[in-house]
Image (spheres, rainbow, N blue to C red):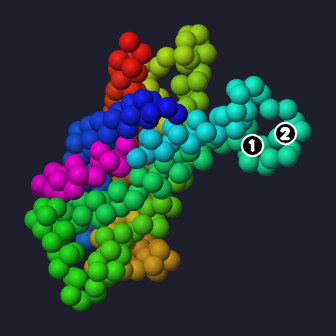
Amino acid sequence: MDARSADSRLRAGALAGTTVDLSLYPLDTIKTRLQSSQGFLRAGGFRGVYAGVGSAIVGSAPGAALFFVSYEGVKDGLRKLRNGTNGSPLDERSIKRDGGQAIARSEPVEHMIAASIGEIAACAVRVPTEVVKQRAQALQGHGSLEVLRKILEQRNQIGVAGVRREMYRGWSITIMREVPFTIIQFPIWEALKGYRKKSKASDTISAIESGLFGSIAGAIAAGLTTPLDVLKTRMMLAREKQSMVSMVRQILRDDGPRALISGLGPRIMWISAGGAVFLGSYQWAYNQLQEKTNV
């Protein structure tokens, strides 16, 4: 991946992340409140659906940019391994000598690996802003700045390391949610794009096509990973830090198994629409930037 291509992906990803977070933020707020242990109405109901939007604005652009640069870079690297550094297919003896190349032979596997690495990179930015955002959405403070101030004020009691842990509350479950989500969504998105390219005998994909395929892939991934999303939300909103196992036990004991699919409808709607906006706007921005680069 050359510097110009990386810059195009960086800027396209930043635009896509900001666009989707701002346009669909109310649905995200409603989903968070449905999943809150306080209950929907006590967590805010339909009031102040843009609460915490400041933290989303701060984190969306760099998080999405990090994801796409990592995703496309790893994907390109794996494709080169599969095809050989000179672009020619590898022979069977070369594949047997190097297990890494054998792993990368299948395009869906390449997309899964690239998406997983992209998500881990993005979560370095996403998790702290998500903690602040979801607490503001659940009305645990009047806006993102007050929520952040409350976290930082704990420094005297828990120290700097404790504040850092608090800002990254839910890191492990976020990774556990995002990695399965992306290894479902992105191979489906890439497969649909590949099928469309073959059907119209062209190497280009329009923003509308990319958005439609992103919507389909996002809806499927969202439905399958909702229990992990519920668990992540409960852990981030909890007054005290809890392990994943104890949180699952508490949810099952207090609210029953159905609680693990709470917010399913809004989550599918939000991510289906978000997939269309996110991957459609990414494709549009990338296509535009590539046209300018090739002039």
For label 1, the SS is: helix
Q: Amino acid at mark 2?
A: Ser
Q: Is residue 99 left or right of residue 281?
A: right
Question: Which contiguous range is marked in magenta?
Answer: 39-65
Relative to 79, say whether 290 is above or below. above
Q: Residue at x 35, y 33 (%)?
A: 12
- Residue 93, x across and y down, in percent: 89, 39
Q: Which residue is mark 1?
A: 101
Q: Amino acid at mark 1?
A: Gln
Using the numbered discs, state the Cα–Cα distance from disc 2 to disc 1 in whole angstroms.
Answer: 8 Å
Figure quadrant of residue 214: top left
**Quarter of the figure that contains the C terminus:** top left
Q: Is residue 273 left or right of residue 81?
A: left
Q: Residue at x 54, y 16 (%)?
A: 203
- Residue 228, x across and y down, in percent: 46, 61
Proximity of marks 2 and 1: CB atoms separated by less than 8 Å: yes
Query: Which circle marks residue 54 in the picture?
Result: none
Q: Which residue is mark 2?
A: 94
